[in-house]
Image (cartoon, rainbow, N blue to C red):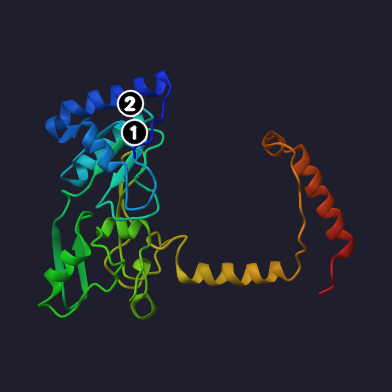
């Protein structure tokens, strides 16, 4: 099933302008065929397909950067697509936009068995990487069952049956090459296993230390909490916030008079 969503005339004009500019650079590697757009707008979940306005097939990181920069200039959404094996709906394009199919960035650039590292492009799948590593000793342990692309696995922090022993995707990625929303490219880290230089951008927001701190804070807050219910007659009442603010004020008064001594 394909969802039907109507966009404003302004959105359509911006998307058409971005597609026209990208068509000059990528030619036949940009398509607006309905069948291709429908396929790239769905994953393996039960959600209907939300097709993008166009699908483009870059072959290098520089081309990805050029696509993102163009979409940024025209304020058009960008939806990356790997193998479509995820279940979270990330490839849906409810606001339209350009789908960037990364399956052609599929080169294994370097394998270093002594360092137990491999450098790959975003479209390489986990089974292909393990086939390449088979005779070298190391292997790639993250197994979400599907033959997903490594870029997609990194974006969803994939895990699987080996996670208890070998960790999830965040525990097996040393460095990432990223394209920022404005088209700039950065690398989050070197190949060094340990570094104290600056922030750990590769694991920022998802590393184990932050998770432990967050868990402790949640438990402490729960020991001093009380359930409160705030009823809204209409959804508009919740959005305007008047009733919600009144509920918050009431809760604050309750806690100020019933706060337990520590």
- Most foreground residue, 60 or 227: 227
At horizontal 23% and vertical 62% (from top left) the residue drawn is: 147
Q: How many marks?
A: 2
How crowded pointer 2 is (Cα within 10 Å; few <14, some 14-19, many 20+) is rated as: many
Q: Is residue 72 above or below residue 254?
A: above
Per the model, the C-alpha gap separating discs 2 and 1 is: 7 Å
Residue 63's x, y, as percent? Answer: 20, 40
Q: Is residue 39 above or below residue 16?
A: below
Q: Which residue is mark 2?
A: 15
In the image: residue 83, left or right of residue 89: left
Disc on res. 84: none
Task: Please report whichever mark, 2 or 1, sits nearer to the chain's N-terminal start.
Answer: 2
- Most foreground residue, 94 or 61: 94
> In what element is the residue under mark 1?
loop
- The answer to whether marks 2 and 1 mark residues whose Cβ atoms lie closer than 8 Å is yes
Residue 111's x, y, as percent? Answer: 15, 69
Residue 249's x, y, as percent? Answer: 82, 48
Which quadrant holds residue 181? top left
Residue 159's x, y, as percent? Answer: 36, 68
Q: Is residue 243 above or below residue 112?
A: above
At horizontal 77% and vertical 56% (from top left) the residue drawn is: 228
Which quadrant holds residue 167? bottom left
Q: Quadrant of the N terminus?
A: top left
How crowded pointer 1 is (Cα within 10 Å; few <14, some 14-19, many 20+) is rated as: many
Disc on res. 97: 1
In the image: residue 52, left or right of residue 232: left
- Most foreground residue, 82 or 133: 82
């Amino acid at each position: 099933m394909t969802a039907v969503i109507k966009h404003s005339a302004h959105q359509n004009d911006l998307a058409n302008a971005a597609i026209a500019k990208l068509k000059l650079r990528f030619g036949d590697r940009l398509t607006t065929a309905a069948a291709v757009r429908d396929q790239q707008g769905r994953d393996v979940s039960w959600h209907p397909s939300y097709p993008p306005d166009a699908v483009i097939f870059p072959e290098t990181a520089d081309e990805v950067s050029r696509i993102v920069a163009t979409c940024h200039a025209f304020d058009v959404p960008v939806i990356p697509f790997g193998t479509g094996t995820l279940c979270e709906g990330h490839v849906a394009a409810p606001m339209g936009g350009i789908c960037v199919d990364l399956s052609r960035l599929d080169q294994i650039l370097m394998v270093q068995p002594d360092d137990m590292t491999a450098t790959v492009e975003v479209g390489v799948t986990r089974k292909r990487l393990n086939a390449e590593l088979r005779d070298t000793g190391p292997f790639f342990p993250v197994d979400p069952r599907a033959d997903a692309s490594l870029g997609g696995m990194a974006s969803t922090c994939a895990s699987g049956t080996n996670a208890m022993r070998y960790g999830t995707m965040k525990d097996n990625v040393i460095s990432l090459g990223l394209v920022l929303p404005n088209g700039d490219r950065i690398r989050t880290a070197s190949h060094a296993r340990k570094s104290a230089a600056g922030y750990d951008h590769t694991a920022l927001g998802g590393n184990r230390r932050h998770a432990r701190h967050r868990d402790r804070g949640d438990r402490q807050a729960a020991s001093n909490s009380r359930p409160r219910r705030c009823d809204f007659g209409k959804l508009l009442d919740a959005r305007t916030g008047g009733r919600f603010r009144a509920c918050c004020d009431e809760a604050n008064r309750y806690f100020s008079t019933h706060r337990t001594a520590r």
